[in-house]
Image: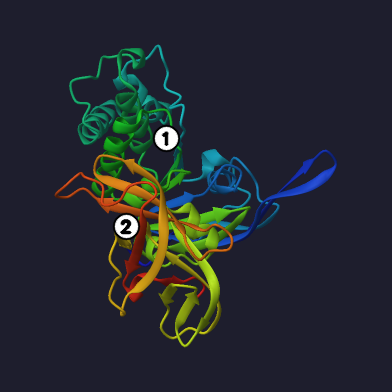
């Protein structure tokens, strides 16, 4: 990646009129996307991520704010004049055309010389691993192959940025996971900026250089996948990205203490909300060492999930029925450490307690 920003949004707002009332779909989003970056807009349905992408593409015009592509203000520039292409979930392939003609369509519209069309389409089909399938029609191909045709058709025009709106949503789980790896490979190979819209946390974590987590028209956190997972900025981010346990209370001398429980939060005093990930927690029947964060509870559910067991543990000293989720990997023995109704200790290292907002 270079120091040049491929895309910049400056305090972008999008308002709609709904039943006589003004509704803000996007509420002042500011972000920069670097040249060559794989950037994801992640959030639940209705959070504003697709509207944000459509403003980058030019299909929607901001009510307020600026959209810049490679330093140029394109806020009022129509989509066909912007050096970006978009891939939709539906793929929108021409059913009567072959793979070759689908991929070559944009080049033919631009009256590109025939020898250059042949070379560029051939190169792109090789990158997306469709060489030898040039004569097939979309209906003769799997969902994953159709998705790669749509990618090739968008990329063959050499856009400065590619926008992808939930492009894997129609695929089954195994194929979707395989295509996540393929998309990242293709992005690295062609070296252009990808902006990816998804509600699937694992997709965003797998592929992205950075992620903007959106909620209710705002960006709640913009950071690397690791930073967002390990150090969530808000309770929403902690709960939306993977599974997280939230514990709230008053810390005194770096310890959040409720009954038999002690959660170590070094350097923190006062009211805190602590998050700890399920895979960081150990479960057992013997009281852990004093240097660990420790809570006691009763197992209410055990679910075998192949690679790991998931435990739901209701805290013994909780007045609100707090339940902690624990993931224990089945690395050596698939037998559950505890069963429903067992009284257990949960423990984790102090560094795995993250105080939200710290």
Disc 1, SS: loop
Q: Is mark 2 on a helix, strand or loop?
A: helix
- Near mark 2 (Cα within 10 A), the count class, few <14, some 14-19 or many ≥20, is some
Instruction: State the image coordinates of residue 169 (x, y, percent, origin top left).
Output: 43, 33
Relative to 53, is 354 above or below? below
Is residue 18 visible to the viewer in this orientation of the structure?
yes
At horizontal 34% and vertical 47% (from top left) the residue drawn is: 310
Give percent across and percent down for residue 206. 32, 49
Residue 341 point in image, percent of width and height: 39, 49
Query: Between marks 2 and 1, how big is the CA–CA gap?
Result: 30 Å
> Residue lying farthest left?
332
| Res. 167 mark | 1
Asked if residue 70 can be seen in this view, the reply is: no
- Give the quarter of the figure containing the N terminus: bottom left
Return the residue at label 2. 279
* As drawn, 358 above or below 120: below
Q: Nearer the viewer, residue 160 or 278?
A: 278
Q: Which of 112 and 278 is in front in this view?
A: 278
Which residue is more in the foreground, 192 or 252? Answer: 252
Is residue 68 left or right of 301 when viewed as pictured? right
């Amino acid at each position: 990646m270079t120091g040049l920003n491929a895309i910049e949004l400056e305090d972008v707002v999008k308002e709609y009129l709904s039943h006589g009332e003004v509704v803000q779909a996007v509420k002042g989003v500011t972000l920069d996307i670097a040249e060559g970056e794989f950037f994801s807009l992640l959030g639940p349905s209705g959070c504003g991520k697709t509207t944000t992408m459509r403003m980058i593409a030019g299909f929607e015009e901001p009510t307020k704010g600026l959209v810049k592509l490679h330093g140029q203000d394109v806020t009022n520039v129509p989509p066909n004049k912007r050096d970006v292409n978009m891939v939709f979930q539906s793929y929108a392939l021409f059913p009567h055309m072959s793979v070759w003609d689908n991929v070559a369509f944009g080049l033919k519209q631009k009256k590109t010389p025939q020898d250059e069309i042949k070379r560029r389409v051939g190169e792109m089909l090789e990158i997306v691993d469709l060489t030898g399938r040039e004569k097939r029609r979309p209906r003769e191909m799997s969902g994953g192959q159709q998705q790669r045709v749509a990618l090739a058709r968008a990329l063959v025009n050499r856009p400065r940025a590619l926008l992808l709106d939930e492009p894997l949503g129609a695929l089954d789980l195994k194929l979707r996971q395989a295509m996540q790896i393929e998309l990242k490979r293709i992005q690295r190979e062609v070296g252009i900026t990808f902006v990816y819209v998804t509600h699937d946390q694992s997709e965003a974590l797998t592929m992205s250089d950075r992620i903007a987590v959106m909620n209710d028209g705002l960006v709640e956190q913009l950071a690397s996948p690791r930073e967002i997972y390990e150090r969530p900025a808000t309770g929403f981010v902690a709960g939306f990205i993977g599974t997280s346990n939230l514990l709230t209370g008053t810390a005194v001398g770096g310890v959040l203490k409720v009954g038999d429980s002690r959660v170590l939060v070094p350097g923190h005093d006062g009211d805190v909300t602590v998050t700890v990930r399920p895979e960081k927690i150990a479960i057992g029947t013997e009281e852990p060492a004093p240097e660990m964060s420790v809570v006691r509870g009763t197992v209410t559910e055990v679910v075998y999930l192949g690679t790991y067991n998931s435990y739901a543990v209701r805290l013994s000293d909780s007045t609100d029925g707090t339940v902690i989720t624990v993931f224990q990997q089945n690395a050596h023995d698939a037998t559950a450490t505890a069963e429903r109704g067992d009284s257990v200790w949960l423990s984790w290292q102090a560094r795995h307690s993250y105080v939200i907002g710290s």
